[in-house]
Image (spheres, helix red, strand yellow):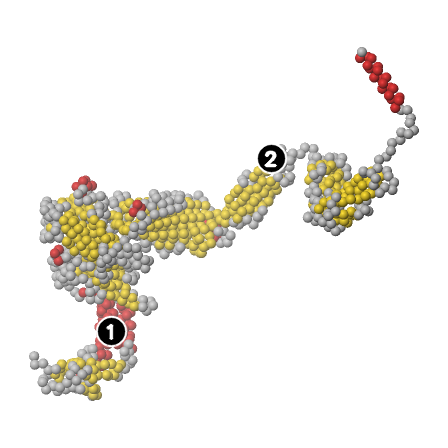
Amino acid sequence: MKKRVSLLLAFVLVFGITFMNVPQANAATKKQVSITLNKSNYTLAKGKTLKLKATVKNKKKAKVVFKSSKKSVATVSKNGKVTAKKKGTAVITATVSGTKKKAKCTIRVGTPVKKVTVPKKSIQLKKGATYKIKAKVTPTKATVKTFTYKSSNSKIAKVSKSGTIKAVKVGSTKVTVVTKDGTGKKATITVKVVKAAATSTAVSSVTINASEKAMFLDDTCQLTASVKPQNATNKAIHWSSDNAAVASVDGNGLVTAHAGGSANITAKADNGVSATCRINVAPTKKVSTQAQLESALNNNLAESILIETNEKVDFKIPEGNYATKTLVVNAPNADVINNGNFARVQIYAIATNSYYENQTGNNIDFMSANGRIVVSNNASATINVNPGASNVTVDNAGNVNVNINTGSNVNIQGSSKLSSNVQINSSDVTFQTKQEAKVVASAKFNFIVDKGGENSTVTVNSAANIPNVSGIGRIPVSITDTNDQQIVMAESNPGLELPTVTLNGVVKVADTQEAIQGASIYLLPYNATITPSNVDTYYGTALGSTSTDSEGMYGFNNIKVGNYILVASANGKKKVLQTVSILSDSNSEVTALRMDMVDVSEVGNGNISGKVRDAKNLDGLSSGIKLRIREGIDTQTGTVVQEVMTNDNGEYSFENLPAGYYTIQAIDTRQLNGAQANYALTSVIVRVKAGQTIEQDVVLSALESNQMRIVLTWGDEASGAPSDLDSHLTGPTAEGMYNFHTYYGDQEYVAQDANGNQITYAALDVDDTEYVGPETTTIYFEVSGNYNFYVRDFTNRSCEGSSTQLANSSAKVQVYYGNNLIRTYNVPNQEGTLWHVFDYDSVTKTFKTINEMSYFTGSEQFIGLDKRQIAIRNCSAEINQAEDILSRITLNKEALQNKVDEAKSLCNNASSEVSRIEAVTDELIELYSKIYKTYVDYDEVSLIDGIDIRCYSDGDIYLEAMNEQAVRPNALVINGKTYDIQWNSETSSYGYIDMTNEVYGYSYTLYIYYDNYDND
């Protein structure tokens, strides 16, 4: 069957072919009509025209009809002339008349392309490489910005529709870029294809060994670059900097820092692959030698200098003003001696022996774990103890402010006598000082007060931040949120090396002042929790115990300075507790307050009332004074029994107090404006008697920060004290000739300041003559030199021996400096009428406790003066007298003036002999007395019958009637010349004569006094 089909199929094929090849004369094919336009699209500017040309094939004399699809955009004439009307697009259609044959041209009315440009007119490509054409048109606002691309020889280089040329084989060709806007504008690129390397692997990535680096001025840093893949054919790297003024780089990647700022360092492969490292140059010059340091100090580009080395070396900064630079120290084994002023000093590491500051005003940030800052004499610094610091010692001989901003141990020591201002801004701080410090704290801290730091003060923002105080002294603490004050007694600190003293005292019967023999005396370390009711439980901590002798005396030897509680216990008597504070400037022998004991049978309650007064004038104060009362003698801390406020008249009262001894504290809690100073906290000791109201005034002092007030108080009449104790202060004068002396006979020392103003430098403000006191002496303006303070028993001033009334007077001297009580002195248990209390050096700001008794029966004006000072004082008085005479005479002044000059020179010369000062004083008196004598020649006053004539050295004449017949004269004959007497009235016994001293050219008044005859 299959065979038949095949034969049939073959037959058909043969037959068909034969049939189709038969010639046919009428079978010729007819050609089709077609039409084309010379433009398929075109861009015309508005108002411009374009002639479209139509070509018609296969039809003779064909008629073409033109038509616009949007005549508002473009019109077309019957001849094919297109006119652009407005922006838009229109299609022009050309139709062969009588047919359906058409051709179209798209007309865009807009901005035509005027020029086509390419980045490179000639390129060379390796075989297989590509190149992207980035053509542009002009103007840039042309309506059409797309192109067509064509290679003249695609076998050498072909181009894609998007404009990417690919090199095909070695040779040359051209690629034409034509705008698609129909204007025909074009550009041509010549492409040369060269043979590619046999094996070429391109760099795909570049990596630098750091993405960012910090550098200092003039430092160098080696950067390295690596490429991937590792088998890349061309691994060449080219280095560059985008800011060579800050940091430059050489061909090997070595970077050099020139100025502060930032720069990007780029490593680039030949094929453009790159990586960047950012270089941040601090305007800091790093140094490790003295020579480098001195060079850096003169480098104007260096805003900071970094001393960085591990070597053990000393750096010395020359004196100079480097206020535009910061000094940074990171040298754990180096010492730095600074003589320059910097914008700031930052210490990150330094040797133990440290940083030496010899300039004024530097601000030092201390971040070293351990270190020492030495501030020399006349230098000053603000020291900021910042995180990183652990143990910092400030050895201060100048003036420092210290801000503690991190938990650390900070110790201030040294020879400076100026107060250090310390700000504590962090918890976990232990602050130790051997100098007076004014501490302001916003956190609780441990305060160790060493020898020399007893006058320190503390201000805290709340009571929760009152410090734990150990060492020595009574530290006044001001609490700002409540405007309150407290005294914090330093508790014992065994780690301090403190001097020792002998402590003694006396115990007597309160009412009779009889000595108590055999009383037990215990010396306990101070503890704020000890009270009369629990003191027995603390006897085990006693540093010693003893008994009083037949005179009631007791003593303890080798007692370290510090705070203690004395306890007196005797049969039939109530225990007495007394707080004792021994300061480091105390004498080797210290006397405690007298301890008066009362019978245990004295029971019941009593009251205290009184008024709070101003120490300067004893005026009563207004309300706002808080008074606290505690059990015991001089008890400053611990349980408060009662607390009251003064009324509008400054009055206060405590009621229903069990009989015994108490300590009253007075605190000024008033909120005052900046022009006023609050009164300093003070305390008084009072004995409450059962069934009685004790009158006890409290005296407060308010001073400016640089003023000193000395307040003397003593016992009342019932205590057996003298009625009148006098305060005596001697000290240097502004004139420098002799010491001034303020006391009841000369209560003010007034002198001219540099501007000629009369200034009160010191004064006895209050003189009390009837028991108790106070007597108040104030130093308003200090003069450089030594001051001495004495208390004299005026009541017993004539005693030359065996006087104990001053010793038994309970006299107490309190010294206030600024608004703080800084010293309290108790009268020693010694015989005498003159108590030399203390000396004060205003230059070094140091007190010297004297606390010695003696007898003095001489003139009050010479208390505290040695023979030389007395001689100078006497001479100075005569100089003043002589200068007064010199101001009045006009002739023959030379001799007296020369003697005055000689006397002044002797008084101002510390090496002048006392005998010579005394001699010139006598010579002055002789000279000016001679001048007085010449006013009236005593021998040349003519006698008058019945009248006795007496002439005195002051030039006055006294007339006395010797009998009843004598008559008051109306004239006197002197040196043969008659002078009328001008009597004040007809019966007056007082008159005068106007005269002229012809020898010295002085007009003066001669006073005449007349006494009538008296039979008696």
Query: In terms of image quadrants, where is residue 370?
Result: top left
Q: How far across and how far down the image is residue 208, in percent? A: 56, 39
557 lies above or below 1015: above
The answer to whether any part of residue 676 appears in the image is yes
Instruction: Out of 104 and 572, give the one closest to the viewer.
Output: 104
**How many angstroms separate mark 2 from mark 1 (CA)?**
107 Å
What residue sits 27% from the left and 53% below the top?
669
User: In the structure shown, which secondary structural element does the residue marked by tag 2 occupy?
Assistant: strand
Q: Residue furthest top?
A: 1
User: In the structure shown, which secondary structural element does the residue marked by tag 1 occupy?
Assistant: helix
What residue sits 20% from the left and 86% below the top?
980
Instruction: Out of 210 and 20, give the one closest to the viewer.
Output: 20
Q: Which residue is mark 2?
A: 228
Q: How far across and how far down the image is residue 839, in percent? A: 24, 58
What residue sits 21% from the left and 81% below the top?
1006
What residue sits 80% from the left and 11% below the top?
1
Instruction: Out of 907 and 221, give the one closest to the viewer.
Output: 221
Query: In terms of image quadrants, where is residue 94?
Result: top right
Q: Residue furthest left?
A: 1016
- Image quarter where the C terminus lies is bottom left
**Mark number, residue 746:** none
Q: How far across and how far down the image is residue 883, in percent? A: 27, 74
Disc 1 residue type (three-letter): Gln
**Mark number, residue 881:** 1
Disc 2 residue type (three-letter): Lys
Q: Residue furthest front?
A: 98
Q: Is residue 272 left or right of residue 80?
A: left
Q: How far across and how far down the image is residue 746, in percent? A: 22, 66
Upstream in sequence: badge 2 or badge 1:
2
Marks 2, 1: nearer the viewer: 2
The answer to whether any part of residue 172 appears in the image is no
Dot 2, how many residues are within 10 Å of its Cα: few (below 14), some (14-19), or many (20+)? some
